[in-house]
Image (cartoon, helix red, strand yellow):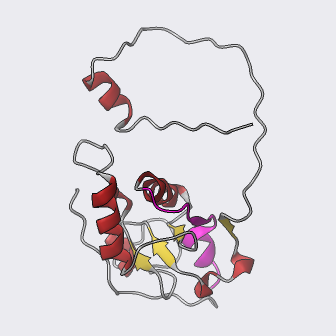
Amino acid sequence: MKTLVKVLDGGWSAWRAAGLPVRPGREHRAPSSFQGAPRERCRVLLSDNPLALPLLDARDPARYRGENEPIDPRAGHIPGARNHYWRLNLEADGRFLSPTAITEAFVTSFGKLPDATTVHYCGSGVTACHNALAQVHAGLPEPRLYCGSWSEWCRDPLRPAAVGGYAQASTVE
């Protein structure tokens, strides 16, 4: 069975802006069954030693550099990680950039072309998924995801944390 996934590029506002049909009220669909299974190759756990992997941090550059940490007990990033703020994947209207523009932004942020060994993380794993989706949208190999992300990493004061470092400036505010 082939898995089909679709993403509404630009979200609800893009749907509305395109004049596509909407109707008021609740939608009702017959229940269906879904059984997911993790793709072990894509999942990175703390036990996989993220320090030894090519890491891209999807958080806001200020959080990556450790200048601001509104959520977690420590500021900074995993040593060796580069920063690719997830909003760098988007046009001002919320749609994905072209595959070429995304690829160029990743190379600028990462210093090289991301590949199947690239591991995305963020604060809790959510915006890292946006970077993973952008990587695939750009026609690049499907990357990996450190699900525990910074929130898991920084909880142990014995794990190293880096501050400062290269973080590509956001062009979208």
Quarter of the figure that contains the C terminus: bottom left
Image: 99 above or below 159: above
Residue drawn 74% across the image and 54% down it: 38
Nearer the observer, 130 or 68: 130
Residue 33 seen in render? yes
Looking at the picture, tell me which residue is in the foreground, 29 or 115. 115
Q: Give the range drawn in magenta.
A: 139-156
> Residue 146 or 54: which is nearer the viewer?
54
Residue 8 is a magenta residue:
no
Q: Where is residue 48 in the image (x, y as percent from the top left)?
A: 71, 79
Q: Residue at x 41, y 79 (%)?
A: 82
Residue 115 location (% of width, % of height): 51, 70
- Quadrant where the N terminus sits is top right
113 or 9, nearer to the observer: 113
Image x and y of residue 168, in percent: 28, 74
Q: Which residue is drawn at 64% across and 91% down?
A: 158
Work out whether 158 lies above or below 140: below
User: Seen in the image, is 140 located left or right of residue 87?
Assistant: right
Relative placement, left or right, of 45 versus 171 is right
Q: Check residue 149 for magenta coloring.
A: yes
Q: How many labels does the image show?
A: 0
Residue 110 locus on image (x, y percent): 38, 77
Which corner quadrant of the image does residue 9 belong to?
Answer: top left
28 up-or-down from 66: above or below: above
When the figure is inspected, residue 66 is found, relative to residue 85, above or below; the finding is below
Q: Residue at x 45, y 79 (%)?
A: 75
Residue 62 can be seen, yes or no: no
